[in-house]
Each structure stands twice: as structure tokens, then as C-alpha cells.
Image (cartoon, coloured by chain):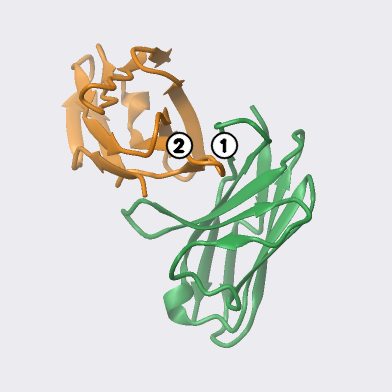
Amino acid sequence: GDSVTQMEGPVTLSEEAFLTINCTYTATGYPSLFWYVQYPGEGLQLLLKATKADDKGSNKGFEATYRKETTSFHLEKGSVQVSDSAVYFCAPSSGSARQLTFGSGTQLTVLP
Amino acid sequence: GAVVSQHPSRVICKSGTSVKIECRSLDFQATTMFWYRQFPKKSLMLMATSNEGSKATYEQGVEKDKFLINHASLTLSTLTVTSAHPEDSSFYICSVSTSGSYEQYFGPGTRLTVT
């Protein structure tokens, strides 16, 4: 089955710092790739996605590029804000049931 | 995206009792619904996948007689934890999807505490 290796947290950054959260995956075929974010006390929200190789997903200043050759989908943001403090999950989706396989989650805390 | 609600948001029950959690898709035809379990500071673990009108498909290690899933309509799925025990205490999250799509939309989750 699919699996995801996600950067261990927690990650603590100062406001306006550069963020990278690494994610590599193994999957059957060519999965779609997603980053979900979970803010404190809330459910998961889709942050961005990429459906084929070399696609770049972007949203709210976050970006991730689908790298088939390295099976990676690293999340980046050039300048984080306090409001970005949350848990971030990397998740490929594949198979006929289109199930998501979640990484372990990375807790991000941004300090003012 | 779809708006998904769960009810209740929190529930406390005594050991040995059963509790039902509802997942509703408010504005979306959810042909497929997923149920996850999230342990503290851990990832989401898929419990089962259900298609409207069909029996749920359970992941390995998930007891189908303990976690009863019903997906009777395109807008409602229920998860019933039968004969709950303290080890069933967890955060249960549902998500919805539609046929042909990889995107899932998540509910806010239900915190179950079994005493």
C-alpha cells in the first residue's frame, strides 16, 4: 500500500521565516498529492494539491511541486505568519477508492 | 468545497454503552464517505470507506462489528461505536468525496471519551 514519510516536528519559526516541510511517498501508479492543514480545534482543510508530475500546487503563499523522480512533494512558504501555526499533513491519493494515506503530521508554531 | 458537519462534536459515554456519530454533507452529493480515527499527536488512520447504499469496506485491523457504519443517503453517514471501552476514546473524523474525484472534504471531528 501507499506510505508517506513526513518531516518530524514540531517546527518552531519566527514570523517571516522561510518554511520547508519535507514529504516523500511511495504509491502505486501515479497518485494525486495533497497537503492538508489542521488549525487548532478544527477539522482538516485542503491546502493545496497537484495531480501530475511537475505540477505545482499553491495556496495562501504555500507551494509544493510534484516531483516524480524523487517521489517528493515538499511544502514551502517564503514568509510564515503567526496565523500559519497548525499541523500540516502530506497525503497521496491513489487506487480505485481514491483513499488518502496521511503522513504523521508536522506541527508548526510561528512566533511573533 | 463541500461543507461537512459532524454531530456531536464531543461525547462522553460509559464503558459498555454504544454511541452514534453522524456525518452530514450539507451541500454535496457524497457518493463516498470515509471514517478516520486520530490519536493525540498522531496521524489519521483510515477506518473504513463507504459508498452510498453499499456496505462499508473496513481497513485491516478494524472490527466491523464494533464500528458499525451506515451510509444510507448521499448526505448522511453514521458511525456507531458499540460496547465502547476506554481504549476507543479518540477523535473520529469523517470526510466526503464524490465519484471520480480525488478530493476529500473533512468534517470537524468528534471527540469521544469513554469512562
Horizontal and vertical percent position of residue A75: 29, 23
Q: The orange chain is which one?
A: A
- Chain B's colour is green
Q: Is residue B113 above or below residue A109?
A: below
Dot 2 alpha-carbon crowd within 10 angstroms: few under 14, some 14 to 19, many 20 or more = many
Q: Name the residue under label 1.
A: B104
The type of residue carrying mark 1 is Gln
Describe residue B65's horizontal placement relative to residue A20 as left or right: right
| Picture coordinates of residue B80, whole percent (x, y) | 65, 70
The chain under label 2 reads A
* Residue under label 2: A93
* Location of residue A61 by image quarter: top left
The residue located at (57%, 83%) in the rendering is B14
Q: Does residue A38 appear in this view?
A: no
Q: Which residue lies at the image location 35% right of the left edge and 39% below the top edge?
A: A27
Going by the image, does B67 lie left or right of A17?
right
Tell me, for residue A105, which label it has, or none.
none
Spatial CA span between label 2 and label 1 = 10 Å
Residue A66: horizontal and vertical position, in percent? 33, 19
